Image (cartoon, rainbow, N blue to C red):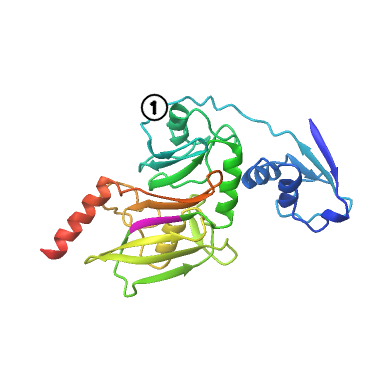
Amino acid sequence: MSVSIKINHESVGLRLDHFLLEHYYKEKSRSYVQHAIKEGYVLVNGLKVKTGHTLKLDDHIQLQAIETKSLDLEAVDLHLDIVYEDDDLLVINKPQGMVVHPASSYHEPTLVHGLLYQVDELSSINGIARPGIVHRIDKDTSGLLVVAKNDFTHQALSHDLSEHKIKREYIALVYGKFTENEGTIDAPITRHPKNRLKMTVASGGKPAKTHFKVVDRFEHYTLLTCLLETGRTHQIRVHMAYINHPIVGDPIYGPKDVIGKTGQYLHAQKITFFHPTKKEHMTFTADMPKEFKKLLDKLTLDSVS
């Protein structure tokens, strides 16, 4: 099944992805629409174009139904730590080492598998592989993320996320000493040109801004809180490495010899968002993992001995 659209004067100059979100994919996320364009399910004048294509008068858009591939996701009891739950959403404290959603290159149980076991309803906006997933945190980063149970809530939270209205605060242990007590890293981030598994700071990348404050100082390390203003992939990890203070334990952006368990000492400890149904701001916090606290206790003892 396909849909044909002819662009009139009112839509001239609009971005293709914005036009489709407003008129044809109102119940879908921006990432869903961009995926459809990139995969060729959306053609303009018979051609595959970029998501930011500028529409011209009499452009002919053809929408093809997106094929969904069954991943045969099974519900798995992962004993997820549900910090909060109501009829519209839930807040999860994700453990370190857990991937958020399945992918073709990853076949172990993920947060999504655990959600399918513990939650009766999840939003459908991101399809069968990512039901309910509004945002992600890295596999080896622990902490809070919000999950939507229905499409209305998902749309509202996704909009607030894109407008930087959802506040996410992390605690991070980094290498080296800071002379300043707080600061802001404003540096664009893009995919690394040689290593596609990494991100890097480079001109022409997407805007990225991280605010940080010093919580505690040790002989060779510093404990920080980091507040994300944007949410780029690996943002805090990339920004800290960029200013020569990589996160302790980070196997990708830090020293090759990691300290403690493999995986960065980075924890999403606080999240604040506006509940779209209750019409109120909600804030949740989660204590750092035991391994994180154990290392801080050791560093504190070392510094006074």
Expressed as whole percent of the image width and height from the top left, the position of residue 220 reads 24, 65
Q: Residue at x 36, y 66 (%)?
A: 213
Q: Tell me where residue 223 sits by quadrant.
A: bottom left
> How many numbered dots are placed on residues in this image?
1
Location of residue 55 with respect to 179 vertically, above or below: above
Expressed as whole percent of the image width and height from the top left, the position of residue 61 reads 82, 44
Q: Residue at x 55, y 43 (%)?
A: 277
Asked if residue 170 lies in the magenta stretch, the reply is yes
Q: Is residue 19 left or right of residue 216?
A: right
Residue situated in front as seen by the camera: 156 or 299: 156
In magenta, the rendered stretch is: 168-172
Where does label 1 land, which residue?
77
Location of residue 220 with respect to 156 vertically, above or below: below
Instruction: Indicate the secondary structure of the residue bearing disc 1.
Output: loop
Q: Tell me where residue 84 sits by quadrant.
A: top left
> The disc labelled 1 sits on which kind of residue?
Asp
Tell me the quarter of the image containing the N terminus.
Answer: top right
Residue 111 appears in view = yes
Expressed as whole percent of the image width and height from the top left, the position of residue 4 reads 84, 39
Q: Is residue 304 left or right of residue 251?
A: left
Q: Is residue 114 left or right of residue 63?
A: left
Mark 1, residues whose alpha carbon is within 10 Å: few (<14), some, or many (≥20)?
Answer: few
Tell me the quarter of the image containing the C terminus.
Answer: bottom left
Expressed as whole percent of the image width and height from the top left, the position of residue 109 reads 42, 31
Residue situated in front as seen by the camera: 70 or 197: 70
Asked if residue 205 lies in the magenta stretch, the reply is no
Residue 56 appears in view = no
Secondary structure mostly seen in the magenta stretch: strand
